[in-house]
Amino acid sequence: MTGTGVVLSWLTAVLGGRFLKGAAINGRLPRSHRELGATFFALGPVRARHLQLLGLLWFFTCLVSIVPYLMLMAFIRVEWGWLIARWMRDLSL
């Protein structure tokens, strides 16, 4: 369960950061579905610096949100590792 949270946070960070980076290159947020697809694959110089900074903030905030998931996984492993090992042993019968 917590591994899924880490993957989803990482995916949100990458896709959201790429979206805002593309919007910074285009100079504005997309207004139609066609522009939405082109925004993800935009390359070139940045026209809107504030959108680029927002994209960087989005990316690093999502990466920081992974830390509680990792702490929870470590806590479960330390505190309940013996119980999980016992369940796994009992299920292998």
Image: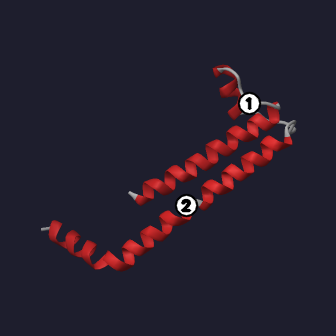
- Say if 43 sits above or below 84 in the image: above
Please state which of residues 40 and 92 is positioned toward the viewer in this rendering. 40
18 left or right of 25? left
How packed mark 2 is, by other alpha carbons closer than 10 Å (few <14, some 14-19, many 20 or more), is some
Residue type, mark 2 in image: Ile
Is residue 49 among what the camera can see? yes
18 left or right of 92? right
Q: Residue 29, position in %: x, y?
A: 74, 30
Q: Residue 81, position in %: x, y?
A: 32, 76
What is the distance, in whole Å, between disc 2 and disc 1 at their CAs? 27 Å
At a point 72% along the width and 52% down the height, the residue shown is 57
Q: Residue 47, position in %: x, y?
A: 87, 36
- Say if 50 sits above or below 35 in the image: below
Q: For numbered disc 2, what is the local secondary structure?
A: helix
- Say if 51 sits above or below 71 in the image: above
| Image quarter of the C terminus | bottom left
- Furthest residue in direction left, as rendered: 93
The picture quadrant where one finds residue 16 is top right
At a point 61% along the width and 58% down the height, the residue shown is 63
Please state which of residues 51 and 14 is positioned toward the viewer in this rendering. 51
Tell me the residue that label 1 is attached to.
29
The circle drawn on residue 66 is 2
